[in-house]
Image (cartoon, rainbow, N blue to C red):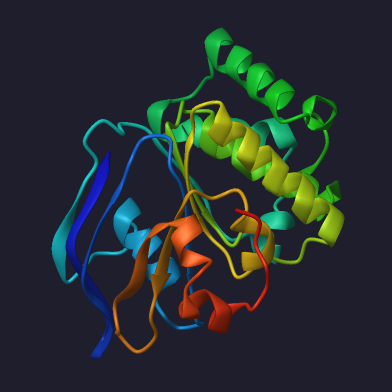
């Protein structure tokens, strides 16, 4: 379980959120939703230690390895590296100069799991958006991450690539990975989730945190999306 206790964050004098508390249990598939500016990405970065909070704490408990798939920008895509090099770079902070046979075995294993074996020796700049997302997912997984955080992973993907990516994440969750995902694509992502956290704008805090089946019956969901979701 990962616990967020009374977490607060701001940028300068602008308070993004205050006193947020919730728990993520092993095996959860949590989707974080909310209006633009509600602090979804800031919350994720604070949990990961990439943004210093104003107050509160994050207790990882049994989650010792955490993987993060950030939003990919054009600078990252144009970086001159092969796919296998990008994936192995997820281990760099643990290594000095060389990767071991075990590291390369893990690389092969993860590429097979994510169906990207044929991409290992291709430049990342030559990949489609959907392929690139799988590579970044592999990079997050190579350290043996037990919980995966994904920030808007399907931005700019076409509908087919989006559906395929969510199928992959759902499969990982069914195989034991805990998933935390930020998405504006509520229609697609929420069908796979079991938990929802809805952040309110203007520092209004958590408007909902609980089971997906309860959230889709709420006024919050109808206002945000207004679509029918299979329970």
* Residue at 49% across, 28% down: 176
Between residue 36 and residue 82, name the one nearer to us: 36
Answer left or right for 131 relative to 17: right
The quadrant holding residue 222 is bottom right
- Pinpoint residue 112: horizontal percent, then vertical percent: 73, 21
Would residue 20 be seen by someone viewing this image from the given angle?
Answer: yes
* Residue at 47% across, 33% down: 92
Between residue 182 and residue 221, name the one nearer to us: 221
Answer left or right for 96 relative to 25: right
- Pinpoint residue 81: horizontal percent, then vertical percent: 72, 42
In the image, residue 171 sits, relative to residue 39, either above or below, namely above
In the image, residue 170 sits, relative to residue 126, either above or below, namely above
Answer left or right for 209 relative to 190: left
- Pinpoint residue 83: horizontal percent, then vertical percent: 73, 36
In the rendered image, the residue lying farthest to the top is: 101
Answer left or right for 20 relative to 45: left
* Residue at 47% across, 65% down: 215
């Amino acid at each position: 379980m990962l616990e967020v206790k009374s977490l607060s964050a701001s940028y300068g004098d602008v308070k993004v959120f205050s006193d947020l508390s919730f728990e993520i249990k092993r095996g959860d598939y949590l989707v974080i939703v909310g209006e633009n500016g509600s602090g979804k990405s800031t919350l994720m970065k604070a949990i990961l230690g990439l943004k210093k909070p104003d107050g509160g704490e994050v207790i990882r408990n049994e989650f010792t390895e955490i993987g993060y798939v950030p939003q990919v920008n054009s600078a990252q895509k144009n970086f001159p590296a092969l796919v296998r090099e990008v994936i192995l770079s997820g281990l760099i902070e643990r290594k000095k100069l060389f990767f071991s046979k075990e590291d390369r075995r893990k690389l092969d294993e993860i590429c097979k799991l994510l169906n990207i074996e044929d991409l290992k020796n291709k430049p990342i700049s030559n990949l489609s958006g959907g392929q690139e997302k799988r590579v970044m997912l592999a990079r997050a997984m190579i350290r043996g991450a037990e919980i995966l955080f994904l920030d808007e992973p399907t931005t700019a993907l076409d509908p087919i690539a989006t559906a395929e990516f969510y199928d992959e994440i759902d499969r990982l969750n069914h195989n034991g990975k805990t998933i935390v995902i930020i998405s504006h694509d509520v229609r697609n992502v929420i069908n796979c989730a079991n938990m929802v956290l809805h952040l309110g704008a203007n520092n209004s805090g958590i408007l909902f945190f609980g089971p997906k089946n309860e959230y889709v019956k709420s006024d919050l969901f109808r206002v945000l999306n207004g679509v029918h979701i299979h329970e």
